[in-house]
Amino acid sequence: MIEASSPLKRSSENGNVLFIILMAVVLLGLLTAVIQMTNRPEGSNIDSETLVIRASEVQRYASELERAVTFIMQNGKSEADIRFAHPDAHSDYGDLSADVDPSDQVFHVAGGGAEYRDAPDDINDGSAWEFYAGTHIPGMGTASRTELIAVLPNVSQAFCDKINAINGQTGPPADTGAGAASGADPGACLAVGALGRFDDAQQFYTTINTTDETTFEQDSNTAAARPAPQACVVCAIGPANHFYHVLLVR
């Protein structure tokens, strides 16, 4: 005689099957999320509110650097004497501990008094702030001279779009051309690279990189680009997005 399965046993087996199915669904969902995160471009895993906070952090820090440069200049230092040495900065910027007169140092309490900071999370590829003087910025200073700028390289497209929107740039502003920095030539990108770091050997270039001013927001009264003390520019070399802030107008 064949013994029929009890209702209790069948219920237990059905429960086990349901549990296994639910676990499979959960694991599939987690796997899908991991794949999406892996394929997501740099900086796109940051929500809109956090992006605004990051943009504000970058703007405040850039203003801090600008004030530090202004303070150094007001204390009688030459524009060519400004230095960006710091133990956490690239060694190209010099050795802060070896400077007997740190009053020209942006990151020293006896100089500009600025704090050295890394870029906020999730807005670029981890590159550190750089300092260059190879580009004339639209609407700033004299066209025949370069500005001293702070550059946050390789920012995400999302951050680039947000910071440009904040600055009223419908752009994106562009730095065209294919020439790389070489010798006394800063090349065709405001993010000059290692060769152009503002240090003892390289200060203000006399050969000037000029951005495409037609890609910046235009002033209808002057038929020229509005002054652009900061923006995110896309360089044709790369291509890559770079945030800049003018520290010293010349």
Image (cartoon, helix red, strand yellow):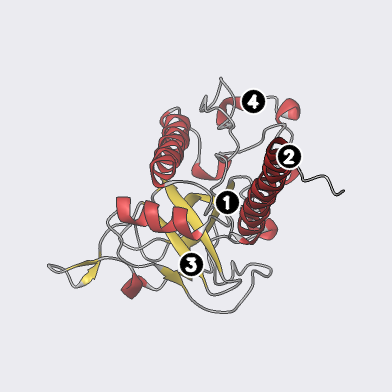
* Residue lying farthest to the right in this orientation: 1
Q: Secondary structure at mark 2?
A: loop
Q: Residues within 10 Å of mark 3 (few under 14, many from 20)?
A: many
| Closer mark to the observer between disc 4 and disc 3 | 3
Q: Position of residue 164 (x, y in %)?
A: 36, 56
| Closer mark to the observer between disc 1 and disc 3 | 1
Residue annotated with mark 1: 124
Q: Earlier in the sequence, mark 1 or mark 2?
A: 2
Residue annotated with mark 2: 6
In the visual, does 34 lie left or right of 161?
right
Cα distance between the residues tagged 1 and 4: 34 Å
Q: Position of residue 103 (x, y in %)?
A: 57, 26
| Closer mark to the observer between disc 2 and disc 4 | 2
Cα distance between the residues tagged 4 and 3: 38 Å
* Residue lying farthest to the left in this orientation: 221
Using the image, determine if residue 151 lies above or below residue 62: below
Residue annotated with mark 3: 234
The amino acid pointed to by label 2 is: Ser
Q: Earlier in the sequence, mark 4 or mark 3?
A: 4
Q: Do labels 3 and 2 touch, CB within 8 Å?
A: no
Q: Secondary structure at mark 3?
A: strand
Q: Nearer the viewer, residue 27 or 128?
A: 27
